[in-house]
Each structure stands twice: as C-alpha cells, then as structure tokens.
Image (spheres, rainbow, N blue to C red):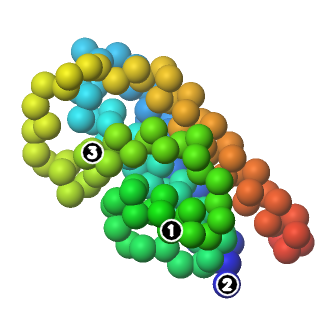
C-alpha cells in the first residue's frame, strides 16, 4: 500500500540535496566527495520516494543498486538514471573515508541536469498520485 506522505517527505528532502548541488559547481570550493555525497543522497531519497509511492515500503539502506533493483521489481522505469549508480561509492557509509584522487572530475553540470530530470519525474508521479487520491 502506497505511502503518499512519506513519498512527499522524501521528495522534499531530495530537492534540498539538489538545491545544495546547484551551489557546488566550483570544484575548488567543494571537493568531489562532498558533491558526490549530495548526488548520492538526492538520488537515494528520490528512489525511496518512488518506492514509497509505488509499494509503500523501501529498504532502509544507502545502496542505490538495491533501491534501483526494488524499483525495477515494482515496474518503475528508471533506466535513464542508471548512470547515477556510479555515485553509490559516495554513500554515507563511505562519507568519512577519503576516496583518493578521482580518475576524472565529475561533470557537475551534467549530473545536476540528470538529478533535476529524476526529481521532475518523481514530482510528476507524486502529483499524479495526489490527483488520483484527491489529496493535496
């Protein structure tokens, strides 16, 4: 059974991580680990929002791979966002470990666009569910 309130709450928090990302374009000010962490968090909360919307429950994990698998099992189309799996290494369990020098810097503008598209997709799904339920 869907949990619309939880879905809305997670989506709101995901937008807050997105807002932080938008202020982190300068790699000289925000290290890659900090930016990557907020990408991972925005994606994690967006995926959990979709799971709350579609099945009501979601795993209390920080593993994007597992969340994506659960979404695929629920029939959600998240194929356009599979590239976000590369940010799994920035999950909270690794937050306090230095990841070493990256092979390549993150294309921050592109990642921000990708997160925005994900959040907009989730926003539409939540709005459709609210309209069907006659709420909000």
Vertical relation: 54 (above or below) 115: below
What residue do we see at 57% from left, 69% from top? Answer: 73
What residue do we see at 44% from left, 55% from top? Answer: 44
Label 1 CA crowd tier, 10 Å (few <14, some 14–19, many 20+): some
**Observer able to see residue 15:** no
Label 3 CA crowd tier, 10 Å (few <14, some 14–19, many 20+): many
- Camera-side residue: 105 or 77? 77
What residue do we see at 65% from left, 60% from top? Answer: 76
Q: Could you say which quadrant of the image residue 5 lies in?
A: bottom right
SS category of the residue bearing label 3: helix
Q: Nearer the viewer, mark 1 or mark 2?
A: 1
Q: Quadrant of the C terminus?
A: bottom right
Q: Which mark is residue 1?
A: 2
Q: Residue 81: percent from the left, percent from the top? A: 54, 43
Give the mark nearest the N terminus, 2 or 3: 2
SS category of the residue bearing label 1: helix
**Observer able to see residue 132:** yes
Residue bearing the label numbered 3: 90
Vertical relation: 11 (above or below) 101: below
Residue bearing the label numbered 1: 70
- Horizontally, residue 92 falls left or right of residue 112, namely left
Label 2 CA crowd tier, 10 Å (few <14, some 14–19, many 20+): few
Q: Residue 13: percent from the left, percent from the top? A: 51, 54
Q: CA distance from mark 2 to mark 3?
A: 31 Å
Q: CA distance from mark 1 to mark 2?
A: 15 Å
Vertical relation: 116 (above or below) 92: above
In this view, the residue farthest toward the bottom is: 1
Q: Could you say which quadrant of the image residue 35 lies in?
A: top left
């Amino acid at each position: 059974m869907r949990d619309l309130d939880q879905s809305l709450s997670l989506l709101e928090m995901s937008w807050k991580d997105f807002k932080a990302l938008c202020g982190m374009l300068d790699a000289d000010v925000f290290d890659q680990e900090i930016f990557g962490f907020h990408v991972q968090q925005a994606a994690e909360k967006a995926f959990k929002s979709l799971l709350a919307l579609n099945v009501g429950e979601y795993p209390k994990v920080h593993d994007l791979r597992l969340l994506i698998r659960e979404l695929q099992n629920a029939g959600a189309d998240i194929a356009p966002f599979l590239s976000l799996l590369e940010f799994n290494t920035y999950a909270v369990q690794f937050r306090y470990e230095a990841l070493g020098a990256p092979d390549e810097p993150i294309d921050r503008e592109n990642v921000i666009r990708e997160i925005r598209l994900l959040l907009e997709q989730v926003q539409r799904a939540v709005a459709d569910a609210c309209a069907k339920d006659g709420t909000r």
